[in-house]
Image: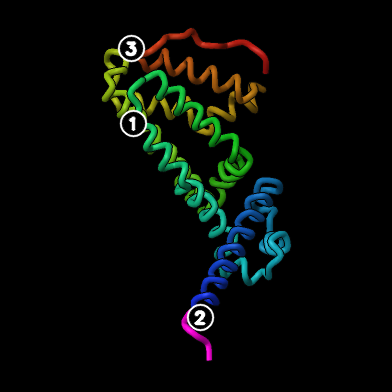
Amino acid sequence: MPTRSSKSAGASRRAEYAAATRRAIHEAARELFSAQGYFATTVDDIAAAARVAPATVYAVGGGKQGLLKAIIEARTTAPDVAETHARIAAATDAAELLRFIVNATRIRFEHSRDLMRVVADTAPHDAGAAQALRTAQASLRDGLTRTARRLAELGALRPGADAEEAAETLWFYLNNNAYFTLTDDNGWSLEKAERWLRDSLHHALLNGVNTTPRPPVISGPR
């Protein structure tokens, strides 16, 4: 007769297997969406890449729309998001905070650029992709709004600027479209884009108090 401990161990193994299966399906979907596009990827493709039955993909992810939504939501609730918010709240130097948030958005873009390009291209034609895009944008706006408020609390914004304007300015410079323009259209490296964005935002937002002004970098290696 099974003991309580053996039942617990069995439940734990089932939970581990379910989590591993979910990860495999999410990773397969993300890679295929990024490589092939959303519409060209089928549930059968995802199932084959994850080495599960198509029915499992539907059961775990709810099909393609559910998977795309889950992948984006998982990114917006990852542990590093809370760590970023804590770093923003604890900042005492405006210039350092600006350097940090630009670097954080650059890293976020670097890790998700292929998928976010697919999401942005698909959103006008698919309700699930549109919702996923709104979720990603809301997460980024939240971090930028927190940054703007902290800059205002530090008394670092230029005369006449408030936290709301600062948040919109940060969004203009640091949303995915800005990075796509600089890297895809201009052909800049991410390093060059990061430098230019950081220096441009410094001059657009900060008043020179508790900061070290630097001229925008507009040339250099790509």
- Number of the front mark, 2 or 1: 2
Please indicate, yes or no, whether residue 138 appears anywhere in the rendered image: no
Q: Main secondary structure of the magenta part?
A: loop
**Magenta segment, which residues?**
1-5
Q: Earlier in the sequence, mark 3 or mark 2?
A: 2
Residue 186 in sight here: yes
Residue 148 percent coordinates (x, y): 34, 27
Left or right of 187, for residue 71: left
**In this view of the protein, which residue sits in the foreground, 185 or 208?**
208
Determine the CA span between mark 3 and mark 1: 20 Å
Three-letter amino acid code at the position of disc 1: Ala
Nearer the observer: mark 3 or 1; the answer is 1
Classify mark 2: helix, strand or loop. helix
151 up-or-down from 51: above or below: above
| Residue 175 included in the magenta stretch of the image | no
The residue pinned by badge 1 equals 90
User: How many numbered circles are shown?
Assistant: 3
- Residue 15: percent from the left, percent from the top? 53, 69
Left or right of 125? Residue 205 is left
How far apart are the alpha carbons under marks 2 and 1?
Answer: 45 Å
Residue lying at the far bottom of the rendered structure: 1
Asked whether, in this view, residue 217 is left or right of residue 80, the answer is right
> In the rendered image, which residue does mark 2 sit on?
7
Residue 145: x %, y % from top left: 35, 33
Residue at 53% across / 33% down in the picture? 176
Q: Which residue is mark 3?
A: 207
> Tag 3: residue type?
Asn
Q: Foreground residue, 22 or 12? A: 12
Task: For mark 1, give the secondary structure.
Answer: helix
